[in-house]
Amino acid sequence: MPTEPLLIRKSTNDLGILVAGQFHAAGLSEEVESHFLFQKQNVVPALRRGFVLPNAIPLSAVPVEMTGYSIEETDYFQWLDHMQKFADKHFGPWVLREGFSHPTRLPWKNVLVIFDPGLTNREMVDKALKARNLGVFERMDVGTYEGAGALSTCRLQIIERSPTPTVATRGLPPKYAKHWFGGRVTRPLGLRAYGIGTSVLHSVEKQFLDPEAKTATFFPENVSGGCVAYGCYGPYGSEVYFGYDDSDYEADRYGFREAIEVPLKPLPSTP
């Protein structure tokens, strides 16, 4: 059976080396240190909650019971297989079924599964879109946004497979995203995952997210100054379009997409 190291990018983890030397300076209590030493599976979620960009929206620290449908009632595994084929072709060999702790319930029946192997925004455009001969228009270079760099590990996310953003967020200015997502089990989909997801959707159904440019998806974690990135598909130019607007801009055609992150399987505990 493939092991988790197959899912980890083969590069020197300079951040890990830096953090290892900072634990004493953090002044963690003995109780906290003991908890994480004996509950090793909680270390990764704690790091994800703590290491966020200044404008990022942190995952909820409070476990939330997932309502909706059992995983067997959804098309999750069907779209996980679609994502696997896409990843094998465009990102290299990865193991998605065995490497993640898949959910047992989801709030949506029709889903889109999105795998980011650790790409930058620029690599996403090149590998997920242009490699499939899809047109791309960037009103601003996608590599200049805060949050445009690669993740230190791969990420698997789930969104509802719908042409439009989450209805309840339509018309909500990006600057209020933190308030709307606060305490939720979901987080806003980012630009990089959006680009991968819209290409996977097109590879299977010949359709894009936000088709006809009648709606657009804001990415509140991809910012530059007071501007926030958004994405849609422009049929007239036949291009996946990445634009930006002010963080206080509101219009009914703009909204966020809710994403659920699927955790990596924890490393086996050592005695």
Image (cartoon, helix red, strand yellow):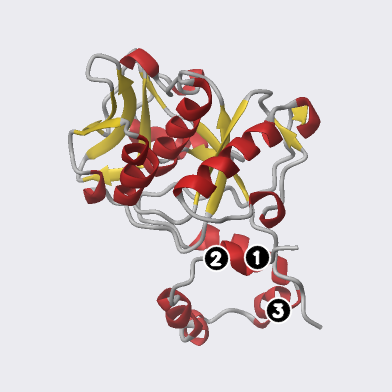
Name the disc covering residue 31, or none: none
Q: Secondary structure at mark 3?
A: helix
| Amino acid residing under circle 1 | Glu
Q: Taking 37 as reference, is 235 left or right?
A: left
Res 260 seen here: no
- The 10 Å Cα crowd at callout 2, few under 14, some 14 to 19, many 20 or more, is some
- The answer to whether 238 is drawn above or below residue 14 in the figure is above
C-beta proximity under 8 Å, tags 1 and 2:
yes
Residue, disc 3? 37
Q: Position of residue 139 (x, y in %)?
A: 18, 33
Residue in front for this viewpoint, 95 or 52: 95
Q: Is residue 126 above or below residue 107?
A: below
Q: Residue at x 52, y 56 (%)?
A: 154
Answer with left or right where residue 67 lies relative to residue 212. right
Number of the front mark, 3 or 2: 2
Query: Which circle marks residue 4 in the picture?
Result: 1
* Residue pointed to by mark 2: 8
Q: Residue at x 77, y 74 (%)?
A: 269
